[in-house]
Amino acid sequence: MDEVDKALEALKVHIKKEIVDNFFADRVYLEEDAELLRQEVEAYARDLANLGKRFMALYQALGSKEACALMMEVLAIEVWPFYPEYGNLSGLEQLDLLKDTRRHGLTAHRRFRNLVFDLYERLQPESVMLRDAYTKIQTHLKLFNEDVDKFNLSYDFGLIAAQMEALDGGREDLMTAGMLAPEREELSTRMRFKRRKLTDEQLPPVPALPPLATIQRKLDSLIGKIYLPTVCC
């Protein structure tokens, strides 16, 4: 083997190594990104559970389904977040939702108003934060799947095998040379990275509620309609 042949052989080895190294490097990147996406969804679920408690505390403070309906009308929300879960709580569990909420005000009406306002002011920023997190996760998911598509296109086993065989002049002793078409397709399928999909059940969307200042007058009117002296005396 002369120097030219040695140089060509070394180049072939280098190209093969680069293909393999790039494959594993890109796959590790996707695996790490998939784990990051999983952690984001997990954190979202935890924050969503906390937001659910905020909504349910507000429902409990309002005191009736009719009052809740008026509140959702003010907020322009058709599907009441966490209301079915609230309805599934026992009476004692519903009462516990407000056990750590301080009541303040000189009159019963004022204490009721302040209770609703205080609960809403805790709920509103958390809803905005969670809506932002939802949007970021959806964007992350879209970019992740785009990277997966690029990976699967770049590392199609059939193309890689053809490149390897071309480099070696179609040698019979190559690992891929004796593979039948179905076997190549099966291996190609195993090498592909799977796209991710998040359903509404896995990543439930939440409404971003308006600041209290923008709906305060409507809430005052609502409280005047629904207030009962027995609600929070």
Image: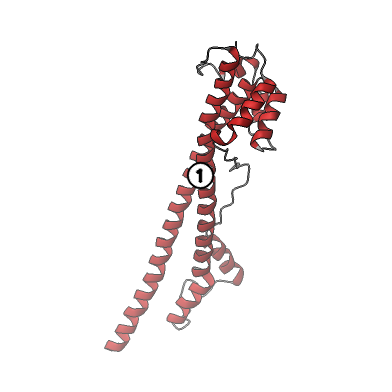
Q: Nearer the viewer, residue 175 or 223?
A: 223
Left or right: where 7 falls relative to 54: left
**Residue highlighted by disc 1:** 133
The location of residue 178, given as percent across then percent down, is: 53, 74
The residue nearer to you, when weighing 58 against 20, is 58
Give percent across and percent down for residue 31: 45, 53
Expressed as whole percent of the image width and height from the top left, the position of residue 203 reads 58, 43
* Image quarter of residue 107: top right
In what quadrant of the picture does the N terminus appear?
Answer: bottom left
Above or below, comparing residue 88 to residue 72 in the picture: above
Residue drawn where x is 57% and y is 62% of the image: 189
- In this picture, residue 120 sits left or right of residue 222: left
Is residue 64 or residue 32 the one in the foreground?
Answer: 64
* Residue furthest left as drawn: 3
Q: Is residue 19 left or right of residue 108?
A: left
Secondary element at image label 1: helix
Q: Residue at x 70, y 38 (%)?
A: 78
Q: Residues within 10 Å of mark 1 (few under 14, many from 20)?
A: some
The residue lying at 49 percent from left, 45 percent from top is 38
**Residue at 65% over, 18% down:** 90
Three-letter amino acid code at the position of disc 1? Ala
Q: Position of residue 187 (x, y in %)?
A: 54, 64
Image quarter (top left, top right, bottom left or bottom right) of the C terminus: top right
Task: Single out the residue that lies furthest toward the right.
Answer: 66
- State whether residue 50 is above or below residue 155: above
Residue 177, compared with residue 199, is above or below; it is below
